[in-house]
Amino acid sequence: MFNKKNVYDAILKPKQERQFTVGTVYSLEPFKVILDGDTVAIPCQSLTGLLGLDTGRRVVLLRYGKQFIAVGVIGEPLHEKMTVDDGVHGLHAVVIGSGQNENGYWRRWSDGWQFCWGVVPVTSPVDTATGSMYRSGDTSTWTFPKPFIEPGGFAWFETNSIYRWPQKTSGTHPTEASFHLFRPNASSYLGSVHGFAVGWWKEPEF
């Protein structure tokens, strides 16, 4: 059986977490990639709505903890001249800036694309009964490290421990996203979750 931990640890050192790297798509179902300099196909995720993925395509990957996320497709356009109707909108732009602050990490591309990620503190204990579960009494809010233009960034959250499930409670917003935390039992432990957001920092250029 595939041992994720052993394969991940063999590929990158811990200090390389939260960095971008490059790989090649090995398969789509399930989605797996082979990192440059390695020969093992590993499980991967991709941004919602990311088009242009296909076996053999080169992709930009973000490593976050033990997880790899495809955030863009590298390569020449599949058509002589791309238009919105082509339906191929991978990474055909250059990175113009990236950085970090107290709210997390961000990266911007020349075509207007922006990706943010970070560790988000939970600010409310899980002490409110809801059916057979418990949820946090109040929402926790993540302020993006860089703002998006209207209608805002599409955000989602993932847990970094077992028996905790973050659920986004807000729609798209230019500067922040909120969430409730759910557990099978009540707990005063706060901790944190992983936050991700994608969208445009300026009017998109296709």
Image: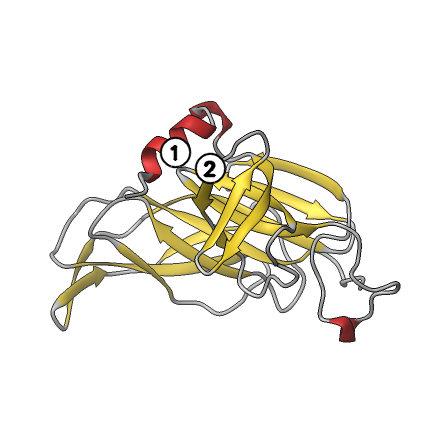
Residue drawn at x 76%, y 41% as measured from the top left: 96
Quadrant assignment, res 175: bottom right
Distance from label 1 to label 2 (Cα)?
Answer: 8 Å
From what the image shows, is residue 126 above or below residue 85? above
From what the image shows, is residue 88 above or below residue 118? below
Indicate which disc residue 95 carries. Answer: none
From what the image shows, is residue 173 above or below residue 157? below
Of marks 1 and 2, the one in the foreground: 2
x and y percentages locating residue 44 in the rendered image:
46, 49
Amino acid residing under circle 2:
Val
**69 and 152: which one is in front?**
69
x and y percentages locating residue 68 in the rendered image:
48, 44
**91 and 200: which one is in front?**
91
Would residue 72 appear left or right of 143 to someone viewing this image? right
Q: Residues within 10 Å of mark 2 (few under 14, many from 20)?
A: some
Question: Which residue is tagged 1?
Answer: 7
**105 and 9: which one is in front?**
9
x and y percentages locating residue 87 in the rendered image:
71, 71
Q: Earlier in the sequence, mark 1 or mark 2?
A: 1
Quadrant assignment, res 49: bottom right
Q: Residues within 10 Å of mark 1 (few under 14, many from 20)?
A: some
Q: Quadrant of the C terminus?
A: bottom right
Question: Which residue is tagged 2?
Answer: 40
Secondary structure state at the residue bearing disc 1: helix
In the rendered structure, are the residues bearing label 1 and label 2 in contact, judged by CB atoms less than 8 Å apart?
yes
From what the image shows, is residue 113 above or below residue 151? above
Would residue 27 appear left or right of 183 to someone viewing this image? right
Residue drawn at x 15%, y 65% as measured from the top left: 133
x and y percentages locating residue 177 in the rendered image:
47, 59
Residue drawn at x 44%, y 43% as measured from the top left: 42
Amino acid residing under circle 1:
Val
